[in-house]
Image: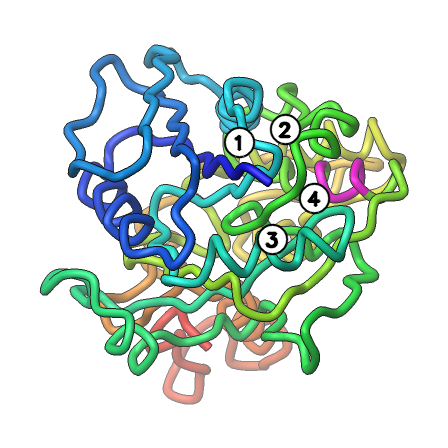
Amino acid sequence: MSISVCTLAFGREEHLANLVRGLCASTRLPDELVIAVMQSAPFRLPDAPFPVRQIMLGADGIPLAAGRNRAAAEARGDLLVFLDVDCIPASRCVEDYARHAESLGGLLMGEVAYLPDGAAMPGIDEARFEQVGVKHSERAGAPKGTHALCSDYRCFWSLNFAMTKESFTRTGGFDERFVGYGGEDTDFGRTVATHELPIWWVLGAKAFHQYHPHHMPPVHHLDSVLANARRFAAKWGEPTMQHWLRAFVLMGLVERAGDGWRKLREPDESDLELTRQQESAPYASSATVLDWLEARAASPDADGGPEATPAPAIASA
């Protein structure tokens, strides 16, 4: 079974370089790395003992869905391993996916550990990454056995997954009508389930997520979240991203309007501050912010004052 690792990138050259360095240390080298380049210039990357192909897509606001689809279309491997640009694959990541793919069909989701700021600065050190990397509190952990069936398509997460090229092609790939941030992963998970392909949590196949500042809930992508929520509901007849939308309501950014949502105002600095991931946190957490917002809404001192509930110290669980 030949294996293509697929990613898409714009900016974050050092993150991408670390992804390449991680693959170079793999116990099973991929047959190629395919990069959908979403900027005008190719990346300068470390030498690798496998082909690295940069597919130039331009820099005109190309949807992430279109980038992943193009990488998959260009890939020559039987198995496609998708890693986000900020992932460093563990040494056994590719080998683990190959092993699981031999016995399982459908879509495979490996483990992810989040690294604190600066963890990758001294270089690739998997032992150190294992010590300092943490599991996201809002994501499933490793299965108790070698694999476990994921019964909820909403858990699909494009950060680190694999499936055969034949299966990916069968689904039609990511829906390129989802533009900007939000919804495209849930939509693809629903598509996979609709095609009766199983979704698996698999042991191993780990990726280490490199730190970068982020906002959760993603107030900086408010417009695209609203547009994609409408698109998902129109396509599938059910809502998505409800936890984010609930947070936006509590923040006074949106309100319910019939079966959808109406934007009330632009996010301001206080909204960004509330949702901003701090440097001491390896990841941003929507649940922490939403819990605080719900507590504030339920508190008689929600308007402020000496007894008011303080904002989260960090946007992390």
Q: Of discs 3 and 4, which sits in the foreground?
A: 4
Find the distance from the CA under tag 1 to the CA under tag 3: 12 Å
Mark 1 neighbour class, 10 Å CA radius: few under 14, some 14 to 19, many 20 or more? some
Q: Nearer the viewer, residue 31 or 70?
A: 31
Question: At numbered mark 4, what does the secondary structure look like: helix, strand or loop?
Answer: helix
Residue denoted by label 2: 227
Lower sequence index among marks 2 and 3 = 2
Q: Nearer the viewer, residue 161 or 279?
A: 161
Q: Amino acid at mark 1?
A: Asp
Residue 29, horizontal then vertical, whole percent: 39, 47
Q: Amino acid at mark 2?
A: Ala
The image's mark for residue 244 is 3
Q: Please give left or right for residue 122 compared with residue 287 in the image.
A: left
Residue 300 lies in the magenta-colored region: no
Q: Nearer the viewer, residue 96 or 38?
A: 96
Mark 2 neighbour class, 10 Å CA radius: few under 14, some 14 to 19, many 20 or more? some
Lower sequence index among marks 3 and 4 = 4
Q: Residue furthest left?
A: 122
- Magenta-drawn stretch, dominant element (helix, strand or loop): helix
Relative to residue 175, is residue 197 depicted above or below? below
Q: Quadrant of the N terminus?
A: top right
The image's mark for residue 78 is none
Q: Please give left or right for residue 211 compared with residue 171 in the image.
A: left
Residue denoted by label 4: 186
Q: Amino acid at mark 4?
A: Thr
Find the distance from the CA under tag 4 to the CA under tag 2: 14 Å
Which span is picked out in magenta?
A: 188-192
Lower sequence index among marks 1 and 3 = 1
Question: At numbered mark 2, what does the secondary structure look like: helix, strand or loop?
Answer: helix
Residue 224, horizontal then vertical, whole percent: 54, 31
Find the distance from the CA under tag 2 to the CA under tag 3: 13 Å
